[in-house]
Amino acid sequence: MAKTKAYAASAAKAPLAPHTIERRELREHDVVIDIRFCGICHSDIHQARDEWGGATFPMVPGHEIAGIVSAVGPKVTKYKVGDKVGVGCFVDSCRKCTECQAGLEQYCSVHTSWTYNGTEQDGTTPTYGGYSERIVVDENYVLRLPDHLPLDASAPLLCAGITLYSPLKHWAAGPGKKVAIVGLGGLGHMGVKIAHAMGAEVTVLSQSLKKQADAKRLGATHFYATSDPETFTKLERHFDLIINTVSAEMDYNQYLELLKVDGTMVLVGIPEKPHQIQSFSLIMGRRSLAGSAIGGIAETQEMLDFCGKHNIVSDIELVPIQKVNEAYERVLKSDVRYRFVIDMASLS
């Protein structure tokens, strides 16, 4: 076991602080990754503060991991020392269930080993995330990062990027399709970039007009403020697809009315409280309300290759690990454009 420097939450709502964890010894198919950068996802905050329940401590968050391979097991064939790689939201799965066999490991019906706040396949060994010096992962759950993209700005692709790519691909965003992205934050800004690169006409729906110039720069054709009631009148039956990235309370029925017949609104944000859905909002347009998590390994690699082809990365603000608690507070105030990434060199 290798002792590894990290930052961890010792209890729910406790500030993150220096901590030492142990990484497993190299197995036959393992890759050791020296973590260079790790994005801060809003779900890191939810879990470190036990806002979703079931959290285990000490917790080392972080599932937007970008680094360099420093060692490989004797049977590793996919990677070599020096490769630029990433790790996303999970580090293993059962590999045998229907979902895993279909390349949908993120929906594994037996046991997904989440990158942190989870357990390995033995069901007892805790997993620790990317706010650390290094991580040891089976090669089949490691992703190859495009060589020409900056490593720091690529880190958020491992969660924010795939969270938006997966539903955009699944619901066939592309030429001739009108796509709305609700919320222009860490997730939303990736949705705008990816949907635009897919060839869709992209509209951003945000509370105010203050991010309008940013949205146009990122690839949006239109921008509307949802605080203006006329927005919901003007855009009635307008969109083929709405990707809702917002975790705050809102009236889903208003947004469903913006869908064309057979349109779909996909939820990728997770609000704290349940929502009430009016049946008529769905029935009177044969509309669908759906949800989507991240992507499987194959789809995540597909997303990274797509981003490499189109030179897509996240808009980031780089911070040292010592400012992680401050960064958490700023995320809650939406005071970042658009994703914090931790420079893990600051840990040494």
Image: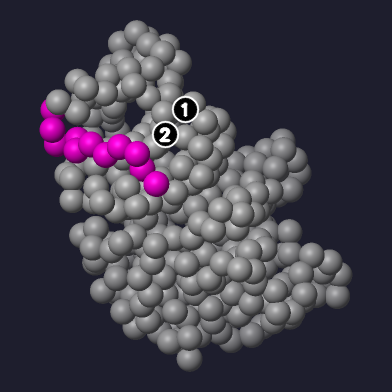
Q: Determine whether 295 is above or below 186 in the image.
A: above
Q: Residue at x 61, y 54 (%)?
A: 309
Q: Position of residue 279 (x, y in %)?
A: 32, 13
Q: Earlier in the sequence, mark 1 or mark 2?
A: 1
**What segment carries the magenta color?**
219-229
Q: Position of 182 compared to 230: left or right?
A: right
Give the labeled residue for mark 1: 177
Q: Position of residue 90 (x, y in %)?
A: 58, 57
Tell me which amino acid carries mark 1. Answer: Lys
Q: Residue at x 26, y 51 (%)?
A: 213
Which of 250/309 is in front? 309
Task: Confirm or deny contact between disc 1 and disc 2 (CB under 8 A).
Answer: yes
Q: Position of residue 305 (x, y in %)?
A: 64, 54
Dominant SS in magenta: loop
Q: Position of 266 compared to 158: left or right?
A: left
> Can residue 152 be spotted in the picture?
yes
Q: Determine whether 128 is above or below 285 in the image.
A: below
Give the labeled residue for mark 2: 201
